[in-house]
Amino acid sequence: MEQPAPQPAYVLHSRAYKETSALVDFLTPQGRVRAVLRRARGKGGSLVRPFVPLEVELRGRGELKNVGRLDTSGIAAWLHGDALFSGLYLNELLMRLLPEQAPHPALFEHYTLTLQALAVGRPLEPLLRSFEWRLLDELGYAFALDRDANDDAVVADGLYRLSVDAGLERVELFQPGLFRGIELLALAQADWDAPGALLAAKRLMRQALAVHLGPKPLVSRELFRKR
């Protein structure tokens, strides 16, 4: 029988399984894959930690795979402080939103680059907002930032609210939670230096993700609050 080809991977989450094994969720170019790592308390188990670039061979035809081989394939992204919490947040988003075994090679590449940027101390907020937007786009939940739900151009002096199903809707009367057109146009250009852009991006992504995440709070957000 032909052996499956090894593929790049990162560990998103792991937990003990039976007596000496671990149940591991990997992020690969082929999507999120769950597999059993036998003898996880041995040498192979030392690799089952987040942010380490791996090469993994996954065997089996069913949804639950078996790890045939597991090796490092590069330099780990050593994250500390807020960068560590940010990396854990990315992993939790992927665990909660990314369906199993749905290929997303571009998202895998973006995740790799984001970890590298976090490791060298790049500003956190633009990295997190960019990753959230890429994740929404990959899952088919993205919406236009420069045009509203009626396909009219967003205007700088307009006020808009987000309808998750339809996109941006222009409103005439001020109400809490609105976005200014000038902020949305800055986000469309990824102009993070524009006044109010980062704060608006955080609010916008929070609203856009909430309906897909459901009521269960994100553990990583609680860690940020308590740090």
Image (spheres, grey):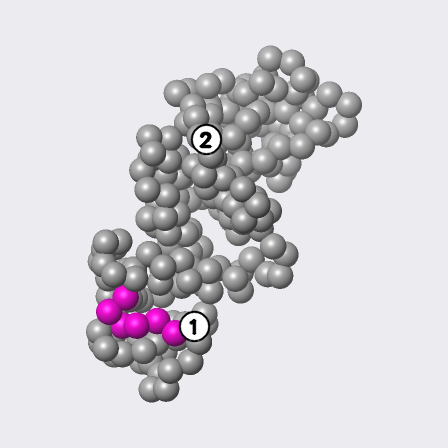
- Is 53 covered by the magenta stretch? no
| Residue 175: x %, y % from top left | 42, 80
At 23% from the left and 54% from the top, the residue drawn is: 193
| Residue 133: x %, y % from top left | 37, 54
Up-down: is 168 above or below 53? below
Instruction: Provide the residue span drawn in magenta.
Output: 178-183
Residue found farthest to the bottom? 172
Residue under circle 2?
A: 80
Residue neighbourhood size for the residue with mark 1, other residues' Cα within 10 Å, grouped as few (<14), some (14–19), many (≥20):
few
Q: Quadrant of residue 34?
A: top right
Instruction: Check disc 2 and report its element: helix, strand or loop.
Output: loop
Position of residue 211 in the picture relative to residue 144 (left or right): right
The numbered dot on residue 177 is: 1
Residue found farthest to the front? 227
Mark positioned earlier in the residue sequence (1 or 2): 2
At 60% from the left and 54% from the top, the residue drawn is: 217
Instruction: Check disc 1 and report its element: helix, strand or loop.
Output: loop
In this orientation, does residue 91 appear? Answer: no
